[in-house]
Amino acid sequence: MNLALKDIRHGLFRFVLTCFGLGLLMTVVLAMIGIYNGLVSDALAVVKAPTADVWVVEAGTKGPFAEASSIPVDTRDAVARMPGVAEAGAVNYQNVEAPHAGHTLRLYVVGYEPGRPGGPQAIAEGRGIGASHFELVADRKTGLLPGETIRLGRNRFTVVGLVEGAMNSGGDPAVYVTLADAMALQTELNPAAQRVQAARGAVSVKSASVAAVIARVAPGADVDLLTATVRQWKHLAAMTQAEQEQLLLASVVDKARRQIGLFLGILLSVSAVVIALIIYTMTMEKLKQIATLKLIGAPDRTIIALIVQQALILGASGWGIGLILILAVKDYFPRRVVLEPFNVMVLAGIIAAVCLLSSALGVRAAMKVDPATALGS
């Protein structure tokens, strides 16, 4: 006879309610883990999208994501001619807000040269950009659909394709346009301001500037040697893909990562204390029944199994309910929630360890019970 299951059936409603409450707590823990992963994943999404080997930016900056960077557009030709470079492309990045369907979309506009590095790697629906102007590929999170149009600046762009998982560190979904359109969007002025600039004879320096040039190296080429060569040019700086990713995590999202990580640590500690209190309380409520078991000669291992099994069932139920709930609601979060199987299993291991430690407190209390207590009122 399994005493743990018998005892659970005796107070089934209370036990189920306790498991559900613990499941809600596990849902919050899993949500924080997913938000933490999502923050890192979003921050690196745009950086990883071009599958570049080398990033060339303005000297003295941490561009193009951690700081603004502006370099001449013809830098791309100079980089492309360097030994070991297989292909190179110029890119621009900027945040814009665009009205659509009665509300405002905040978008991360990526300008690139079709046929060169910098654009989306995989189109989930529709096609890539085929015209030189006024077409865009959007991330699904924008809510845009192929065939729709959206106004960016003073021009309307037609959505020709959709991608997935393209966004910046702030969680803004990306849209891809041609470099020419992105540069025009970045430098355009309203008509009155344009007339004033024309009357002054002013020429925008940024009109021929881009944020960065990205390069892919040929097989066997030395990436470190290439970046060192570029750094010798006084007006340029260069970094590898790994350095760019590390720079982004260390500067742009570092505080947010640490804050979420700290909150997650606190939440795990609170969860451990709550689980320990629940299991200890469940044990203390059964002291008279445990004394009765001792009085009729039940071995200690039977009593220990009762407490440990109930603790593990409680922990497993809470973990399972939490996992089901977070999987059901994670797509409704404003920021992306990324749950990896490794994270879920680590949390299961933590819960199992906490349950075993907590049951040890209950076992200690149970072992001290005098069998004569069962004869009391």
Image (cartoon, rainbow, N blue to C red):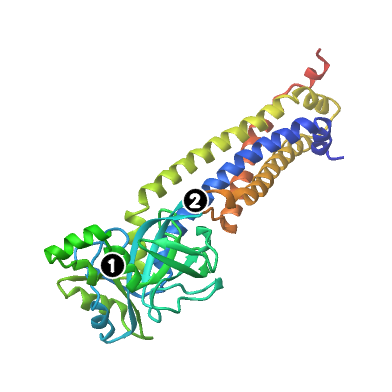
- Whole-percent x, y for residue 77 in the image: 26, 82
The front one of 10 and 373 is: 10
Determine the CA span between mark 2 and mark 1. Answer: 32 Å
- Whole-percent x, y for residue 93 in the image: 34, 64
Res. 248 image quadrant: bottom left
Q: Which residue is mark 1?
A: 211
| Observer able to see residue 256 | yes
Q: Helix, strand or loop at disc 1?
A: loop
As drawn, the residue found furthest toward the left would be: 200
The residue type indicated by label 2 comes to Gly
Vertical arrangement, residue 147 with respect to residue 270, above or below: below
- Precedes in sequence: disc 2 or disc 1: 2
Vertical arrangement, residue 121 with respect to residue 191, above or below: below
Residue sitting at 34 percent across and 55 percent down?
A: 250
Residue sitting at 58 percent across and 49 percent down?
A: 332
- Whole-percent x, y for residue 159 in the image: 49, 68
- Whole-percent x, y for residue 120 in the image: 45, 72
Which quarter of the rendered picture does the C terminus lie within?
A: top right
Q: Residues within 10 Å of mark 2 (few under 14, many from 20)?
A: few
Q: Which mark is residue 102?
A: 2
Q: Which mark is residue 131?
A: none
